[in-house]
Amino acid sequence: MSKTLIRLDELDQAASLDEQDYRGKLKKYQLKLLNQQLILRESKRSIVVVVEGPDAAGKGGAIKRLVGRLDPRLVRVYSIVKPTPEEHRHHYLWRFWNKLPGAGEIGVFDRSWYGRVLVERVEHFATDREWQRAYGEINEFERQLIDDGTIVVKLYFHITKDEQLARFRLREADPYKHWKITDEDWRNRKKWNLHNEAAEDMFEKTSTDRAPWTVIPGNFKWFARVRAVKTVLDAVERALGSKG
């Protein structure tokens, strides 16, 4: 296993892009990713993209740019919320097995099975034994996917606590974005350090040679979006052995 030793409070958030550079690079990488999608379709392999990070870290905006130029018939985005009563009756990985992409398809998970070792750990929705056991279960789950030909890409967007506060306030003031901010977001913020600690443990225990975590500095949205698309593109090119 490749250990990703990183402290989120030490993450360099200085990287940024001007608008011209942002638009040029984004368009370039989106086109290349579209070309890779066409190759993927013929290869009969699939892609799973896991997207995690704190509230208001820019996950949704990055996902929008990631899939925005792709063939929508071959892409599914899943926004993961708390399990339904039916899902709750099964092992927590059951509901993710049901959403895995088919051959030639891409599945993007806006939050994922890592909730067991992140929010469920912090909020005590899972027992200590359950979330501690989950590291091994998740690694085995991803190993099975990869052995079956699935390309697994894991992205973690991170912002500073001050930047999160600024984005929360903007959401509260914007009538078109007010729905994005909830009381739960404010409650989560009070446990900022606990959420970071859980994430750092997750990197250490689940960043493997075959399914590593990429931690993306998110304070500058344009940089984070381009970095996300480029990271997925690079992973697909390596796996398929082709350049778009």
Image (spheres, helix red, strand yellow):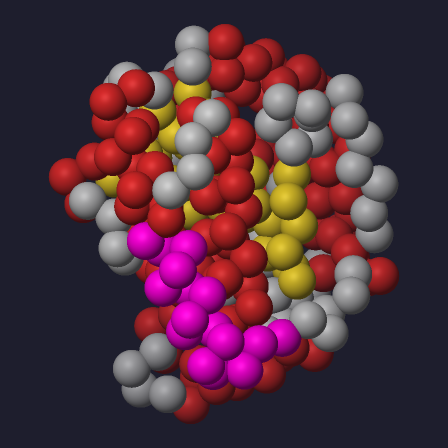
Asked if residue 30 lies in the magenta stretch, the reply is: yes
**Percent position of residue 226, x then y:** 50, 62
Please tell me which residue is depicted at 68% across the width and 71% down the height of the picture. 15
- 41 or 130, nearer to the observer: 41
Position above or below: 122 against 64 = above
Q: Residue furthest front?
A: 243
Q: Main secondary structure of the magenta part?
A: helix
Query: Percent position (x, y) of residue 25?
Result: 46, 65
Inspect the magenta stretch and tell me whether residue 9 lies in it.
no
Quarter of the figure with the C terminus: top left
Residue shown at 43%/9% (left/top)?
Answer: 148
Considering every residue shown, the one lying at the far left of the view is 73
Quadrant in the rendering for residue 48: top left
Rendered view: 182 above or below 71: below
- Is 200 situated above or below 151? below
Residue 206 appears in the rendering: yes
Residue 236: in sight, yes or no?
Answer: no
Residue 100 place in picture, x, y as percent: 33, 24
* The N terminus, quarter of image: top right
Lateral position of residue 73 relative to residue 109, left or right: left
Side of 64 relative to 229 (left or right): left
What is the span of residues highlighted in magenta in the rendered image?
Answer: 16-31
For the residue pair 186 and 12, the one nearer the viewer reads as 12
Looking at the picture, does residue 129 appear above or below residue 61?
Answer: above
Total number of numbered discs in the rendering: 0
Q: Name the residue located 59 percent from the left edge and 83 percent from the top edge.
A: 166
> Residue at position x 42%, y 47% from top?
110
Relative to 109, 166 lies left or right: right
Q: Nearer the viewer, residue 218 or 120?
A: 218
